[in-house]
Image: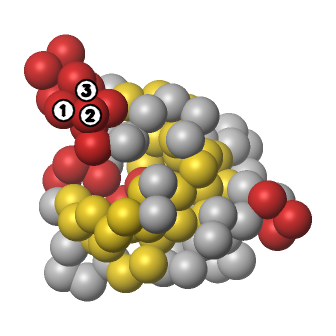
Amino acid sequence: MSDCDAESGCSKEPILCPLSRVIAGTAVRIKRLSAPANVISRLREMGFCEEQQIKLLSCHPNLICLVCNARLGLSAELAEIILVEPLPASEDAE
């Protein structure tokens, strides 16, 4: 995977990058969960589903995300397994 760019926090090719590499304030769409089945199931229960739009609000020391109008915290380790793509500015999650 190529380096992340400064604007969106994600690489340009390929489009996917771990949520842990996204810059705070960026809206993204979840594309893939790369974890054991029990972890994926729990993430989906919390709203971290494929194609779900989320916004990263903060990333120090843990990540705070806006998911389904709720703020949820994740460890950086857990955010590594959530692969996302940046949203165009017109689709930003509020």
Q: Does 58 sit above or below residue 54?
A: below
For mark 3, what is the residue? 40
The amino acid sitting under disc 3 is: Ile
Q: Are marks 1 and 3 in contact (CB under 8 Å)?
A: yes
Between the C-alphas of marks 3 and 2, the distance is 9 Å
Between the C-alphas of marks 2 and 1, the distance is 5 Å
Q: Is residue 81 shown left or right of residue 87? A: left
The residue under the point 33% across, 78% down is: 59
Q: Position of residue 5 (x, y in %)?
A: 66, 69
Nearer-N-terminus badge (3/2) = 3
Q: Are marks 3 and 2 in contact (CB under 8 Å)?
A: no
Disc 2 residue crowd, few under 14, some 14–19, many 20+, Cα 10 Å: few
**Any mark on residue 45, and which?**
2
Instruction: Give the number of callouts.
Output: 3
Disc 3 residue crowd, few under 14, some 14–19, many 20+, Cα 10 Å: some
For mark 1, what is the residue? 42
Q: Does 23 sit above or below residue 78?
A: below
